Amino acid sequence: MTQDIDRRAFMELAGLGGVVFASALAGCSNLAAAPARDFHFVQLSDIHWGFQGPAVNPEAGHTLQRAVAAVNALPKRPDFIMFTGDLTHTTDDPVERRRRLREVKAIIADLEVKELYFMPGEHDASLDQGAAFIEFFGATHASFDHGGVHFVTVDNVSDPAARIGDEQLAWLKADLGRFGPDAPIVVFTHRPLFDLAPQWDWATRDGAQALDILMPYRHLTVFYGHIHQEHHHMTAHIAHHAATSLIFPLPAPGSQPRREPIRWDPAQPFHGLGFREVLAGAAPFPEQITEHPLQAS
């Protein structure tokens, strides 16, 4: 079963007034640099390979493989897949950290997609500033172009203080400075760039500085992970879309005193877990977001 999130559904999920969201789309409908062709990509997030907790996910050792099979079973092969962090569950042991990264890389090798892109989460990178992640998956921040859209990955996790840092912010400004204000741009992060729930570490210390850099671009969208649930938010004209996890869901932002995983429901196995497809149509971008819940066999 899939859930298509079109403009009206997003507006309802986000709890936004029609005027706010309509005004954001009004600019998008006049893209000066629309995608050169239709394409779609998949976002996978928060795998937490190595997590153990039968009360939370008794299938933790097989959930990633289930997700790989589900992506391979999509009717149309995605152009690429983006992993938005926390490929592994945190460990103080650098040998174990590398073992988990190695195992993730081996499992996702079965994905029938040519292009795979990766960024770390704090579980992957905060204890060694991304050193092990870089060994297996390359740079923690980068940019690339696909189908007329510019994509950027921003690392807001390798710094244990949850900062992007001045050096990377300068790189981001220079990277985007090559494009005009009407260029279609997608930014991937792990943590949200806005203050969603700072008391739960659902924020980026210098996220406001990043948003200042992004704000001049009228057709810019942010996809992120970290919060283990679908969530939609607007910062002025910039839409932020959080993805579900592939290990366990978390409660709604700030809905309870402690941030604790939602326990496994045997009546609804894999409830709250899944991945998403994003269709990049000619205009506006994104044309459609489709959520794919993981299904029990």
Image: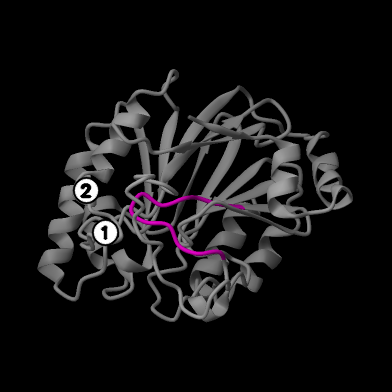
Q: Quadrant of the C terminus?
A: top left
Q: Which residue is mark 1?
A: 88
Say the numbered circle drawn on residue 104. Answer: 2
SS under mark 2: helix
Residue 101 coordinates in the image, percent (x, y): 20, 55
- CA gap between label 1 and label 2 equals 8 Å
Can residue 287 be seen here? yes
| Left or right: 239 in relation to 202 | right
From this view, report whether residue 171 is shown above or below residue 77. below
Residue 242 covered by magenta stretch: yes
Task: Establish if 26 lies above or below 48.
Answer: above
Please report the residue visible at 30 percent of the width from the left and 64 percent of the height from the top: 124
Residue at the extreme right? 19
- Give the magenta-colored segment's residue range: 241-252
Question: Would you say the residues marked 1 and 2 are in contact, meaning their CB atoms lie under 8 Å apart?
Answer: yes
Whether residue 219 sits left or right of residue 280 in the image: it is right
